[in-house]
Amino acid sequence: MIKKERLNWILDQLSQQSIIRVTDIMEALQVSDMTVRRDLAQLEKEHRLIRIHGGAQSLSPINRQEKTNLEKQSQQVAEKRQIAAYTAKRIQDGETIFIGPGTTLEFLAQELVERKLRIITNSLPIFEILQESPSVDLLLIGGEYRPVTGAFVGSLASNNIDSLVFSKAFIGANAIYKDAVATYNESEGTIQELALNKAIEKYLLVDHKKFNAYDFFIFYKTSDFNYVITDSKLSDDIKAQYETLTHVLRADEE
């Protein structure tokens, strides 16, 4: 494939999915890392894309805006409830767990209100769900507040988490693509990475629409999670694809 064809192929891919990785271009076009990076550098110089770490991002309006917590609450509700109910069965009374921000995790919190647990979170909505529980020992990690998601982030939140250890951490994400798990906001991703690193077992909770998707900030490797829990609508083919990286648990399976 000549250079012009490569450049047009890259732009065509970006028009469809907004973000593309260097490794994906190398694999699809059978070219070297240096060739891809030269092509991306030229397209950036021509103001036709934005280079980001490990790839490139489209300049077109297809790029997603961050959805608010309220907007997400009405999306894939049945799937999120299914994931939450399934996940709750993997938590033992007496454990110390971390629950990150996100609407799927809020459904998980609802499942745990009557449980005897120590729960740490940086999510205000999750704190509000659990605060009246007579049996949950609850700790809210403070810091810089992000109203769009209800999460606390920043150096204060990082310092608070750094002194703790969890038996399990339950984290959500906006996208999972091969060995990359991503979210929209870098500061939230950084807190989630830190919490995962302080956990003995690491769980990613994502509905089926988050697979083979992109978002802005990659905060963890799929292969570094002990388990990915999803809903019953995930296809067998995609499940098999990701099981080469980690244990994928579908909520309709024992």
Image: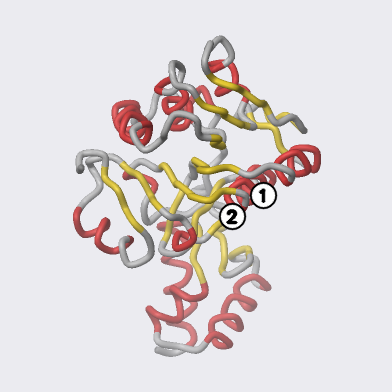
Q: Is residue 103 above or below residue 203?
A: above
Q: Is residue 233 above or below residue 18?
A: above
Q: Is residue 50 above or below residue 2?
A: above
Label 2 residue SS:
strand
Q: 233 or 230: which is nearer to us? A: 230
Left-right relation of 134 to 148: left
Quadrant of image for the C terminus: top left
Question: Hey, what amino acid is under mark 1?
Answer: Thr
Between 35 and 199, the one lying in front of the other is 199
Q: Contact (CB < 8 A) between labels 2 and 1?
A: yes
Reply above or below: 18 against 28.
above
Could you classify mark 2 by the number of other residues whose Cα lies within 10 Å: few (under 14), some (14-19), or many (20 or more)?
many
- Which quarter of the image is occupied by the N terminus? bottom left
Mark 1 = which residue?
190
Dot 1: element: helix
Q: Percent from the top left, x then y, of residue 40? A: 59, 75
Count all numbered tags in the image, as a single digit.
2
Circle 2: residue type: Phe
Residue picked out by circle 2? 219
Front-most of residues 26 and 93: 93
> Within the image, what quadrant is residue 128 found in?
top right
- Percent of width and height locating residue 125: 57, 21
Q: Residue furthest front?
A: 94
Instruction: Give the residue displayed 29% in from the left and 48% down from the top.
Output: 249
Q: CA distance from mark 2 to mark 1?
A: 6 Å
Residue 8 appears left or right of 240: right
| Residue at 55% in and 47% down | 183
Residue depicted at 63% across the width and 64% down the height: 52
- What's the residue at 34%, 26% (across, down)? 77
